[in-house]
Amino acid sequence: MKKDIWHDALNEADEKWAGEYAEILRKDAEAKADNTAPAAQNGMEKTNPVSQKPRKLPKWTGWAAVAACLCLVLITVAATGGFNRRQVPAQPTTQQVDVQPTTQVEGTTAVRPSDAPQTSENPTDPVVEASVPATSQTPAPQNSDYEMQTPDTYYEASITADSYCRAAMVPPSPTYFPGGELPVWNTEEYSHIEENSFLSVLTSPFSTFAADVDTASYANLRRLINSGQTIPEDAVRIEELINYFHYDYAEPADGEPFGVTMELTDCPWNSEARLLLIGLQAQKLDAEALPASNLVFLIDVSGSMNSPDKLPLVQRSFMTLAENLGEDDRITIITYSGQETLVLDGVSGGEQARIMGTLEELQASGCTNGEQALRMAYDAAERHFIPGGNNRIILATDGDFNVGVTSEGELARLVQHKAQKGVFLSVLGYGMGNYKDNKMEAMADNGNGNYYYIDDIAEARKVLVEEAGGTLFTVAKDVKLQVEFNPAMVKGYRLIGYENRVMAAEDFADDTKDGGELGAGHQITVLYEIIPAGSDFEIPTVESRYGQTQDDAPTLTNTDEWLVLNIRYKEPEGIESTLLTYPLAADAYTPGLSANAFWAAGLAHWGMELRHSEYVGEMAVSDSEWVRQMEDLATDDFRQECISLIRKSLRIDYPLY
């Protein structure tokens, strides 16, 4: 048997040495036979040992033997099916992989282990057979060169285009996930919010902040609640929850940019405090009086926008806006991914078919070089600048910048410098998973614009059509509010919300410091908790060598006032601010909350509960009676939807009656 194997091996060996080696084997076998003949002595069998020395073979025969062994190994492997089979170990059931499920993307080829049974028409196309639900078998997303290795199996996503971009490096969804569940992949970013605390009037008599009419936080919160996701505390900006809704405020007097409403009433969650409401109503403009617009649609078409809630919704949003453009309007469309592209350059708003067609043809792919695109957009806006008109860039993105200038601070400085040339910036945020709220808010705040989150087409219509005057047409810029409290009447106060808009008191009169922008018809609502003088409510103070009691307050002439509201603003094209002053008389307190104050207070406390605030106090919006009273004030679809969101987020049971 052994000899047969050797001969089989020799058949596979090189002809150069096979014959010689066979002759050596033959002679060696004959020599062994001569020296091992049996001999019988005294009736017993006995083997005579070999007495002669073994034959010394040439050195090259050793290498020949090694080669023959290798041939034998190859023959054995070929007989068992080759190297193209290996057993896939059993998958662990406790491994957690932080990857978001994605949808089928055309042009994607998944390369999987080759040890699985062949199921495709092409026998050379290896696939893995895995016992998981069909819904979890999703190929790797487009625009990715991402590689992932699980404990026992290896997957590789091979993408046909737009690779090597971090924006597009969405982790792929492999065929198998331990436990059969697809983990959620989430890299959303929000700026940290350090909640405002109570301040003593003796040490901090001024409360100064920039106006803010952004509403992105509310719309984003709606998305989080409706999708059943955990709500990050920093995603809740209380002032934006309140400012999403309209209130019954005084209209502006003739010649003034806005009207002012102030109410002082009971604080529903703190029995030792008063609740101050300040409401600003910007002047409204008739459609016929609106100036011509020079709009630049700056659209992110990078790979990260390849999702139904991103680029397709962006296209529908801008189409909705385009339907309301006029002949005198000028429209520029710039797209950006790995490179920026000027798609339309200053065409008339009357060319709606051309604008619509251009929007419809947009496709997502590539990296996200937002910096160069922003520069191109500002250049285009300046090139088509309309004196006295509405010159504005509308940026639509998920905020996932990853090429060029990418940090929040750098982007803010870029748009702040460009804003000095009279071009405003509005930011529309889209999508989820990699949403960068912090960058978009910073750009809007520093670019003389507003920030909105678009989660569906209804929100797009609200922002771009129903409230287009406020979104697109600024009536007052660099708006700052400063409340000076009278220490004879007020012991301490706490501003609710506006944490990222607070300014130093000395910046109020500094016209080089940026404020907020008010569009036509916009409203601003501000809430304060106020602790009256003489209250036992403890407010942190700083030790003073020269005294720090209410009796130490300086002698005042206006002791019959709770406070004075100071407002500074500039005309849309102005460079110097105008000061307006509104005192609140000592008899302004009214027990019981008005409809305005009740709704705003409910939203403020809802936000505090979601943020797990230390100031939630004695009240809970989750109390069914409070929600029922808010429901009585839900006079439109937006407020009714809000009641539903409050119920979902705080898990309030139905019915309430």
Image: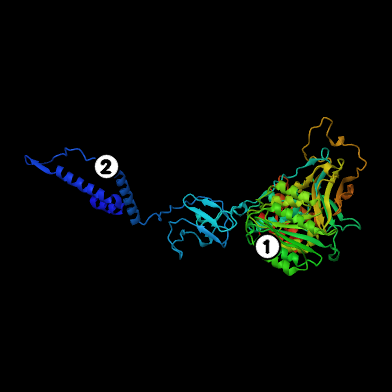
State the quadrant of the C terminus.
bottom right
Which disc is residue 56 wearing?
Answer: none
Q: Which of the two labelled residues, at mark 2 and mark 1, occupies the earlier sequence position? A: 2
Judge by depth and name the residue closer to the eye, 524 or 24. 24
Labels 2 & 1 near each other (Cβ < 8 A) = no
Q: Residues within 10 Å of mark 2 (few under 14, many from 20)?
A: few
Which disc is residue 58 wearing?
Answer: 2
* Residue 401 seen in the figure: yes
* Residue 211 seen in the figure: no
- In the displayed structure, would residue 313 be above or below residue 146? below
Q: Position of residue 436 (x, y in %)?
A: 67, 52
Q: Position of residue 634 (x, y in %)?
A: 75, 61
Between disc 2 and disc 1, the foreground one is 2
Q: Position of residue 187 (x, y in %)?
A: 62, 51
Judge by depth and name the residue closer to the eye, 220 or 574. 574
Determine the residue positioned at 85% across, 60% down. Answer: 284
Q: Which residue is mark 1?
A: 313
Q: Position of 419 compared to 433: left or right?
A: right
Spatial CA span between label 2 and label 1:
81 Å
Amino acid on which the number 2 mark rests in the picture = Pro
Determine the residue positioned at 8% across, 42% down. Answer: 40
